Image (tube, helix red, strand yellow):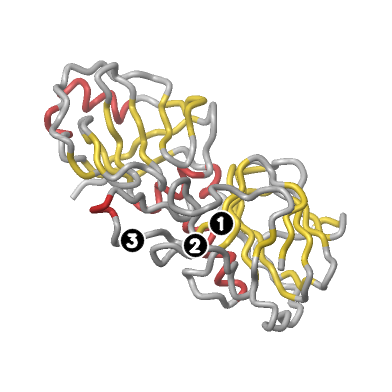
Amino acid sequence: MVKVLKTGLYSTIQDLGRYGYQDYGVPYSGVMDIYSASMANILLGNDKHAAVIEMTMTGPALEFSCDTSICISGADMSPKLNGLPIKLNKQIPIKRGDLVSFGKLISGFRAYLAVLGGFKTEKIMNSYSMYSGITKQAILLKNCNLSIDDSLKSLEKKHAAIKMVNTHFDIKNIEVFKGPEFQKLSKEQQSLLFSQDFTISKENNRMAYQLAEPLENSLEPIITSSVLPGTVQLTPSGKLIVLMRDCQTTGGYPRILQLKESAINIMAQKFTGHVIHFDLIIG
């Protein structure tokens, strides 16, 4: 078991998502940054679908009641084991009674803690991903206990660590494809989309990121149609909304762009005030 002593700002259990239920209006959910979460699982030898803790801006404090191994990847939130700093992207042996905590955010926005064998919390519709209305818990709660497979032995201690690609956290370029309604934009609107920078507004969460700079819009709403994580919608008021992992499954705003999968991962590490630039993928 792992006991949550402190929750952090917004911590949840996530895996790669809940697929096959979108016809019923169930969001995909899953980790916001698949690249970082996968790195943590790979370094532990876990299945890529193993559930992890996703942490946003600040991390929790966790007490382990068994021997195991962990790996932390993604944002640097100054992780510590029993008060001493530990490295990211490295196998960390854990002993019964150990305390893992986090401090100052150094880089990125979301971090991932994987445990040997994955977290074994409530599984609904073939996924452990927490989502309000689907799972009993939408976020980690103080003093809750998270099940893990305590029969798995701690991995042999290794000193090697993998260095993450820095551009994943630093780059502002977001690669996109043309969306279904892109051609309805004027040539001027199309040009503006790719010539100016956009700023992440304070309205950003697992459902969607709103951009601060408006794009003048005279398009009519569309018939409610399918949307996906990474869909960029244009509202009647000119707001650009980038849908993220917990987004709805349908929408009535024009879908003018679609983020490349790797671009969703990059976007997930941005927060209020960060600047992005759309790069159109040709062909």
Q: Quadrant of the N terminus?
A: bottom right
Task: Give 211 or 274, whichever is nearer the viewer.
Answer: 211
Q: Position of residue 261 (x, y in %)?
A: 36, 53
Which label's residue is closer to the chain start, 1 or 2?
Answer: 1
Left or right of 250: which side holds 128? Answer: right
**Residue drawn at 66 percent across, 65 percent down:** 71
**Residue drawn at 49 percent across, 44 percent down:** 268
Task: Give 281 or 65, whichever is nearer the viewer.
Answer: 65
Find numbered disc 3 in the image and state the secondary structure of the residue it sits on. loop
Which label's residue is closer to the chain start, 1 or 3?
Answer: 1
Q: Residue placed farthest to the right in the image?
A: 83
| Residue 13: assigned label | 1
Q: Quadrant of residue 187?
A: top left
- Say if 49 sits above or below 183 in the image: below
10 Å neighbourhood of mark 2: few (<14), some, or many (≥20)?
many
Find numbered disc 2 in the image and state the secondary structure of the residue it sits on. loop
| Residue 272: assigned label | none
Cα separation between marks 2 and 3: 12 Å
| Residue 128: assigned label | 2
Left or right of 34: which side holds 98? Answer: right
- Say if 9 sits above or below 216 in the image: below
Find numbered disc 1 in the image and state the secondary structure of the residue it sits on. strand
Residue at image mark 3: 19
Which label's residue is closer to the chain start, 2 or 3?
Answer: 3
Q: Amino acid at mark 1?
A: Ile
Q: Amino acid at mark 3?
A: Tyr
Task: Give 9 or 272, whichever is nearer the viewer.
Answer: 9
Q: Position of residue 239 (x, y in %)?
A: 33, 22
Q: Amino acid at mark 2?
A: Tyr
Q: Position of residue 29 (x, y in %)?
A: 42, 52
Cα separation between marks 1 and 2: 7 Å
